Amino acid sequence: MKYESQKIALAYFSVALALFAIQILGGLLIGYVYVNPNFLSELVPFNILRMLHTNSLIVWLLLGFFGAAYFLVPEEAEREIHSTKIAYLQLLILVVGTLGVVVTYLFNLFEGNWLLGKEGREFIEQPKWVKAGIVVAALLFLYNVSMTVLKGKKTAITNILLLGLWGLSLLFLFSFYNPSNLALDKQYWWYIVHLWVEGTWELVMASILAYLMLKLTGVDREVVEKWLYVIVAAALFSGILGTGHHYYWIGTPGYWQWIGSIFSSLEVVPFFAMMAFAFVMVWKGRRDHPNKAALLWSLGCATLAFFGAGVWGFLHTLHGVNYYTHGTQITAAHGHLAFYGAYVCLNIAIFTYAMPILRNRDPYNQVLNMASFWLITSGMVFMTFTLTFAGTVQTHMQRVVGDYFMDVQDALALFYWMRLGSGIVVLLGVLVLIYSLAIPRREIISTDATVAAE
């Protein structure tokens, strides 16, 4: 660790990991509700469980991004973070807002209240007071990091990272606009949801992945930056108009079917470029970095993002196919693997690289960390295939043959049991991961001493 203010990242990573565990537990409960529909139906209904699952996913990923920025920006800018007090205040606001959301959802508080009650818009159900807090926290963060970069050295990595973080913060402002017309509402709603995960978040992903490749492989910065600019250009070119694949069936003009199909197909390109970038950097690398676990997560991120976001996204992005598959379990298969590959693996990669440094235990025993990668990844891949097959059967029975929805759900029971089993494997892997990152230092010393003795 070169700069004292990098320690800020440890607090963000710790809170993010706690929320990660909660998110996976929520997902496991949802998986069980699919096979036992009345479970917790009166205490915590399915829609509340799902809100907690998706909201905790978004919050812990954002906390990971913020922590990554506080870790890498000082090194890239070659100066301390502008204000550590602002950084911790930002974290406090986000934690209070998260707790407020959980309590509001669980106890259904302030129903119908425009300021304190939850809204009925997927992923952005947060009460307005929480959204206002998120905006304040985002402004504090952007000011803090931007001032650090402006006063220090500018690099392609920090430039792209700031572009992505400013973009996602500004796009979130659309969550305050809730028009009465449903088609118009959905049009602006996708400005947040799509342009985050297939626009600004991709810039964040590319910059953090470039930083990791720079540190783990020893490739020249000039090579990394050239790749970075190509990937970012491809992501923005395809991702912005690729929003059109969400406009097929919401009442927008028919030309969106062509625009959405063409540009959505091109969204595979930046993810393939990121995968190629990661493997080429390792191939060209001159450094045998001791943190093999961080490298494994980085390569896993690039590979699984290509398959989850790229290949599985392409499977049902053309409007002729989407007409039948829209809203089926195929969508769930794509969503799970895409988020896991592109953003979950990315966050875990930077956690795995940075946390040993921040806790003064680098190098460390990585066996458990690498085992967690294979456990979580195998669980998620199996879940993806399970949901893909379930979605294929569902599409045929429900959308082609015309069977009743609940009859189709009964026919998918076996797939839901398999999905639940894969969720248990994922949870086990997450627990192993958290333990591997939080092993007391004395265990590491004893392990290193044993190795040294041998």
Image: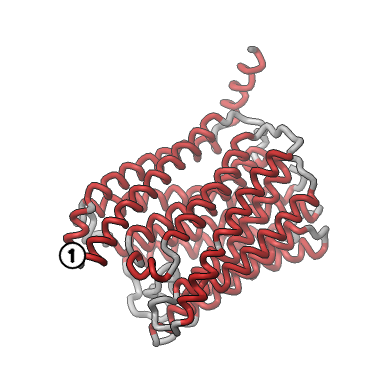
Residue 262 shows in the view: yes
Residue 302 drawn at (x, y percent): 58, 49
Q: Nearer the viewer, residue 10 or 242?
A: 242
Q: Is residue 187 left or right of residue 399?
A: right
Q: Is residue 37 above or below residue 4?
A: below
130 versus 357 height, above or below = below
Farthest residue in the bottom direction? 180
Name the residue located 71 percent from the left edge and 51 percent from the top edge.
Answer: 72
Whole-percent x, y for residue 399 in the image: 26, 67
**Where on the picture, by quarter, is residue 236?**
bottom right
Does 316 sit left or right of 324 as displayed? right
Q: The C terminus lies in which quarter of the figure? A: top right
Badge 1 density bin: few <14, some 14–19, many ≥20, Cα 10 Å: few
Secondary element type, mark 1: loop
Where does residue 180 sit, x and y in percent of width and height?
A: 40, 87
Placement of the N terminus among the 4 image quadrants: top right
User: In which quadrant of the rendered view does residue 46 lie?
Assistant: bottom left
Foreground residue, 300 or 72? 300
Which residue is found at the position 50% from the left and 51% from the top? Answer: 307
Residue under the image location 38 percent in, 58 percent down: 332
Looking at the image, residue 432 lies above or below residue 248? above
The residue shown at (70%, 68%) is 143
Disc 1 designates what residue? 403
Q: Amino acid at mark 1?
A: Asp
On screen, residue 431 versus residue 242, left or right, reads left
User: Along the horizontal axis of the image, is 345 left or right of 42?
Assistant: right
